[in-house]
Amino acid sequence: MFAKSCNIPAGHTCHADKAPLDPLSSYGTFAVLGTGEAIASGGTSLKLIGNSASSLAVASRLGQGALSLGLAELTVGAGVVAGGIVGTVAMLLPNSTAGDDVFYTAEQYADLSTANTGVRINVKYLPDGVVSTYGFYTGNNPAWKGVPVIAAIARGEQFVADLGEGIELIWTPAAEPNKVLGIPALEGVEHKPTHFVFPEVRQAEQILVNPELPPDYRDAIIWFPVETGILPIYLSLNVRNGPGVVSGVGQDVVGVWLDHARSGLGAPIPTKIADKLRGREFSSFDAFRKAFWIEVGNDPELSRQFNQDNLERIQSGYAPATRDKDAVGKRGTFELHHVERIADGGAVYNVDNLRANTPRNHIDIHRK
């Protein structure tokens, strides 16, 4: 296998009893990197957002080379949208595998199309702009433990791995390796300080907002020719949309608007709010979300449906709090849901593709 918790004995691939809540660092050295700006065809550098080891140590594990994300030439995949996309990756490099024959050798990856790993990782931007990284323990779940193996192919001095949907991972050697001091930081981006590997879905749902599960991850193990000296790395990719213009007409809603957020697909966007937002351009969906709640708070009719505490929240651009029985764990505010997933081509800024949901109903939707 590729990686497992350091708490699992040699010769074993998973916990003998119930798996604990482990820190991600127990599976190896990890780093989170992002482009910070739209991915370009020639490659946009990945800069450091968070890591479990020093920047210099991570760079050393990468052969002192630099990583970037690029758009494949003459290719526009389903995940590449107008306005550009910003890429964030979580990278895992296992600690020493010596003396434990359950780990693959570096040479074996050349013959593998899929490989087993004890953890799969997701990385995402939260509504407040903080980057969250978490993993799921795969155990003996056959639908979770296998990930694609992708070869990095030589292209001149670079090595390039095709991550699918028109996105490439590019490794570029340093001109002067001895002068590499680490990976530059991506300024202005905060990384959530806790990075857990959850043993079960229910536990994750008590802490995380709409946690994605491993079958939905865009992850792979990237292997380099043995002669490069670069060991295989696990990489999980997340892309988010750049700027976009609001479209859609919304729906007329009868009664208390957010009462509809507790069932079905949730509460549709009211026509009067769609009229206020349509045609406006936003730099990110987070910026749109803030403007959306402000418009709700400014509407004379809708604003009367909130108590004073929630009115102050939405007029400041924050989602209103739900009733206790509609909350799940730490998720206690209304959430926006894309009816057709963005990954499946759903329109990001079309209000007709959006619904407001309670956390409990949002979780139920994603379970179906």
Image: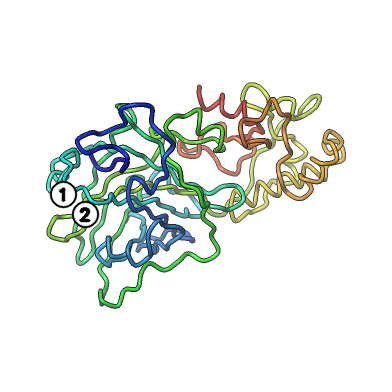
Tag 1 near tag 2, CB within 8 Å: yes
User: Which residue, given by chain and number where applicable, does mark 1 sit on?
Assistant: 106
Q: Residue 110 location in percent, x, y?
A: 14, 45
Residue 318's x, y, as percent?
Answer: 71, 46
Residue type at the position of mark 1: Ala
Figure check: 79 above or below 65: above
What's the amino acid at mark 2?
A: Leu
Lateral position of residue 329 relative to residue 311, left or right: left
The CA distance from mark 1 to mark 2 is 7 Å
Quarter of the N terminus within the rendering: top left
The quadrant in which residue 351 appears is: top right
Q: Residue at x 15, y 55 (%)?
A: 225
Q: Is residue 38 above or below residue 78?
A: below
Residue under numbered circle 2: 231
Which quadrant would residue 102 be assigned to in this image? top left
Up the image or down, 106 lies above or below 57; here it is above
The x and y percentages for residue 297 are 80, 43
Near-viewer residue (41 or 183)? 183
Front-most of residues 264 and 278: 264
SS of the residue at dot 1?
helix
Determine whether, in the image, residue 118 is placed left or right of residue 259: left
